Image (spheres, helix red, strand yellow):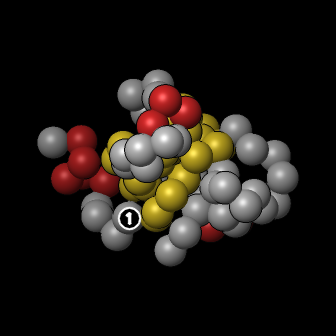
Amino acid sequence: MNGQNRKDIHPGLPVAIILKKDQRTGRLTEGVVKDILTSAPCHSRGIKVRLEDGQIGRVHTILQTPVESLKA
């Protein structure tokens, strides 16, 4: 699942995001959504979120991994 639709994203969801500094390389950072920062219903480059560890980026992929395994 891609991260272009706001309705698909909610706090507690495991995601892979692209940080601003990694846009050129496309390096992904995995984490759990804390806050949704984009107010629009969709965004072509991905919905902007804040992860539980404070990092901010655009959702590239919604992961199927349980939240507990990401926190361990």
Viewer-side residue, 61 vs 37: 61
Outermost residue, top direction? 54
Report the number of numbered marks: 1
In this orientation, which residue lies closer to the viewer: 36 or 58? 58
- Residue designated by label 1: 63
Q: Position of residue 60 (x, y in %)?
A: 51, 58
Query: Position of 35 compared to 41: left or right?
Result: left
Image location of residue 46, percent across then percent down: 64, 55
Q: Which residue is at a point 31% across and 54% down the rendered structure image?
A: 67
Amino acid type assigned to the residue bearing label 1 in the image: Leu
Q: Is the residue 10 above or below the residue 7 in the image?
A: above
Q: Secondary structure at mark 1?
A: loop
Residue situated furthest right in the rendering: 40
Looking at the image, which residue is at 43% across and 49% down?
26
Tell me residue 27's x, y (percent): 37, 46
Dot 1 surroundings within 10 Å: few (below 14), some, or many (20 or more)?
A: some
Q: Position of residue 45 (x, y in %)?
A: 67, 55
Q: Is residue 14 above or below residue 34?
A: below
Q: Is residue 65 above or below residue 69?
A: below
Give the quarter of the image for residue 43: bottom right
Res 35 seen here: yes
Residue 62 in the figure: left or right of residue 65:
right
